[in-house]
Image: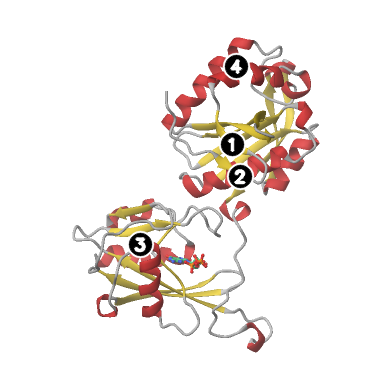
């Protein structure tokens, strides 16, 4: 089976689908009481054939979109070294997925689990339709709880879970994180109408963003997905962006539409529609939304962002920033 999954890279590691030829090394690393004793579903001793079966099952899960279990590999000169595994399993029919990981004992103490689990979680929130990552750690396993906290998950209560290798039920801590816990904090807005130095105490800077609902001849609206690394990664938004100093909203939008979608729009084709005025925490967002039905060129994602042409009555199926919610309702009624 060929798996359509681009490896995820971190500073030191690569997360890639497991391969049949990883089985022997994977078995050597995981058939270790110190590793298995902390993992809920695995038996001990861990039979060699289970490694083959499990690797094959992870390929099927990635293809079906039900779970993403990946090898964590490092580099020793030119040689790739299997270090452990990290995975996310989606809870069927929800926007939640459970995070799990293990690292071979000789690689402990180097921050591998934090680096791998953080990367997979942030990738997942940006690229899969998920809103929440959760995990559990044995109460006695402080090392794992520390990993989850460093990744950005927060404690969400206690419970119990079955640990197969231990032959029974043990107390666990539950952890979870939403998008705002795991994606980059909002950058301090640069182009502001009122500058920070001129602000009275307690006032927030105003961030001017310009955005557009492109409407195609079928009446569908274009949404773009915020990529990994940006605040609110994974949410769908109207194309657009922050104004550069000195730009009018129309000029900024024409520039953004060229940069992000490679289309040419004239100011005459930008019809003012409505605006968002939203308290975004560190700043206040003011975002005029234009409607545009005519442009030149073919829409393409120049920055690798996912795009979707969406029927107005389906817009609410897409998770969007809070500022956009009132705009979606108005757009649905208008189109
Ligand atoms: N483009 C756009 N931005 C939105 C929408 N809703 C919403 O809250 N925003 C917010 C998210 C960000 O705080 C801000 C846009 O800033 P950004 O950093 O994504 O814009 P940009 O394209 O200029 O990004 P960059 O060049 O600085 O990377 O506006 C929307 O529908 N479209």
Ligand 1 contact, mark 4 (Cβ < 8 Å): no
Would you call the spot at circle 2 few (<14 residues within 10 Å), some (14-19), or many (20 or more)? many
In percent of width and height, residue 311 lies at 27, 55
Q: Provide the residue designation for mark 4.
A: 51
Would you call the spot at circle 4 few (<14 residues within 10 Å), some (14-19), or many (20 or more)? many
Q: Given the current orientation, which residue lies at the most extreme left position? A: 217
Secondary structure under tag 3 reads: helix
Can residue 227 be seen? Answer: yes
Q: Provide the residue designation for mark 2.
A: 119
Q: Closer to the N terminus: mark 2 or mark 1?
A: 1
Q: Are marks 2 and 1 in contact (CB under 8 Å)?
A: yes
Label 4 – label 1 distance at C-alpha: 18 Å
Q: Closer to the N terminus: mark 2 or mark 3?
A: 2
Secondary structure under tag 4 reads: helix
Residue at the spot x=60%, y=21% of the render? 22
In percent of width and height, residue 120 lies at 58, 41
| Quadrant of the frame with the N terminus | top left
Q: Which mark is residue 15?
A: 1
Label 1 – label 3 distance at C-alpha: 30 Å
Label 2 – label 3 distance at C-alpha: 27 Å
| Quadrant of the frame with the C terminus | bottom left
Q: Kindly indicate the quadrant of the structure image that contains residue 199.
A: bottom right
Q: Closer to the N terminus: mark 4 or mark 1?
A: 1
Q: Provide the residue designation for mark 3.
A: 261
Q: Are marks 4 and 1 in contact (CB under 8 Å)?
A: no
Can residue 42 be seen? Answer: no
Label 2 – label 1 distance at C-alpha: 9 Å
Question: Nearer the viewer's eye, disc 4 or disc 1?
Answer: 1
């Amino acid at each position: 089976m060929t798996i359509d999954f681009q490896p995820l890279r971190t500073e030191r590691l690569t997360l890639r689908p497991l391969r049949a030829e990883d089985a022997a090394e994977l078995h050597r690393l995981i058939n270790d009481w110190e590793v298995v004793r902390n993992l809920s579903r695995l038996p001990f001793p861990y039979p060699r054939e289970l490694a083959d079966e499990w690797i094959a099952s992870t390929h099927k899960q990635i293809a079906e979109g039900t779970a993403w279990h990946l090898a964590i590999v490092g580099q020793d000169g030119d040689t790739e070294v299997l270090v452990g595994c990290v995975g996310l399993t989606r809870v069927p029919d929800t926007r939640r997925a459970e995070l799990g990981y293990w690292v071979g004992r000789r690689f402990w103490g180097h921050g591998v689990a934090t680096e791998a689990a953080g990367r997979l979680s942030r990738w997942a929130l940006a690229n899969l339709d998920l809103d929440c990552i959760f995990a559990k750690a044995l109460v006695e396993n402080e090392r794992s709880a520390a990993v989850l906290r460093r990744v950005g998950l927060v404690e969400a209560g206690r419970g119990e879970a079955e640990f197969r290798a231990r032959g029974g039920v043990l107390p666990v801590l539950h952890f979870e994180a939403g998008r705002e816990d795991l994606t980059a904090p909002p950058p301090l807005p640069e182009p502001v109408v009122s500058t920070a130095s001129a602000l009275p105490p307690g006032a927030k800077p105003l961030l001017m963003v310009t955005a557009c609902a492109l409407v195609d001849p079928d009446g569908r609206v274009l949404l773009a997905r915020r990529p990994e690394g940006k605040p609110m990664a994974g949410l769908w938004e109207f194309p657009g962006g922050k104004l550069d100093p000195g730009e009018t909203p129309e000029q900024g939008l024409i520039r953004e539409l060229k940069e992000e979608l490679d289309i040419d729009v004239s100011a005459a084709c930008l019809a003012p529609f409505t605006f968002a005025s939203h308290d975004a925490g560190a700043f206040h967002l003011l975002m005029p939304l234009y409607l545009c039905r005519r442009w030149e060129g073919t829409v393409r994602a120049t920055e690798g962002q996912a795009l979707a042409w969406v029927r107005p009555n389906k817009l609410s199926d897409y998770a969007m920033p809070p500022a956009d919610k009132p705009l979606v309702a108005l757009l649905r009624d208008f189109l």
